[in-house]
Image (spheres, rainbow, N blue to C red):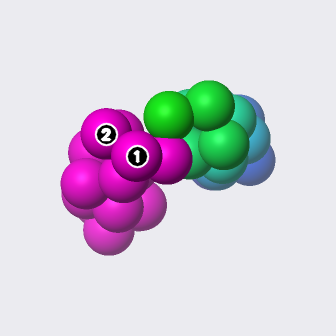
Amino acid sequence: MVNTVSGLVMQHYNIDSNGKTELSLKMHTLE
């Protein structure tokens, strides 16, 4: 399940790494 979350976060980071950076970082920290 961790792999799936990581992939989703990576995709989001690539798509909107300008406004979703904080969210991605927070999600990553949660994991």
State the separation of the CA atoms marked 2 and 1.
Answer: 4 Å
Residue 27 visible? The answer is no
Q: Residue at x 40, y 46 (%)?
A: 18
Give the x, y percent position of residue 8. Answer: 63, 33
- Kind of residue at badge 1: Asn
Could you say which quadrant of the image residue 11 lies in?
top right
Q: Residue at x 50, y 34 (%)?
A: 16
Q: Is residue 11 above or below residue 24?
A: above
Q: Answer yes or no: do the residues labelled 2 and 1 have beta carbons within 8 Å? A: yes
Q: Quadrant of the N terminus?
A: top right
Q: Is residue 9 left or right of residue 31?
A: right
Give the x, y percent position of residue 12. Answer: 56, 34
Q: Which mark is residue 19?
A: 2
Residue that carries the numbered disc 1 in the rendered image:
18
Q: Could you say which is closer to the camera, residue 18 or residue 7?
A: 18
Helix, strand or loop status at disc 1:
loop
- Give the magenta-colored segment's residue range: 17-31
Q: Residue at x 66, y 42 (%)?
A: 14
Q: Residue at x 35, y 40 (%)?
A: 20
Q: Which mark is residue 5?
A: none
Q: Quadrant of the C terminus?
A: bottom left
Magenta span: chief secondary structure: helix
Q: Could you say which is closer to the camera, residue 11 or residue 30?
A: 11
Q: Is residue 15 above or below residue 2?
A: above
Q: Residues within 10 Å of mark 2 (few under 14, many from 20)?
A: few
Q: Is residue 16 left or right of residue 1?
A: left
- Kind of residue at badge 2: Gly
Could you say which quadrant of the image residue 13 lies in?
top right
Q: Is residue 29 above or below residue 5?
A: below
Q: Is residue 20 magenta?
A: yes
Q: Could you say which is closer to the camera, residue 7 or residue 12?
A: 12
Residue 23 visible? The answer is yes
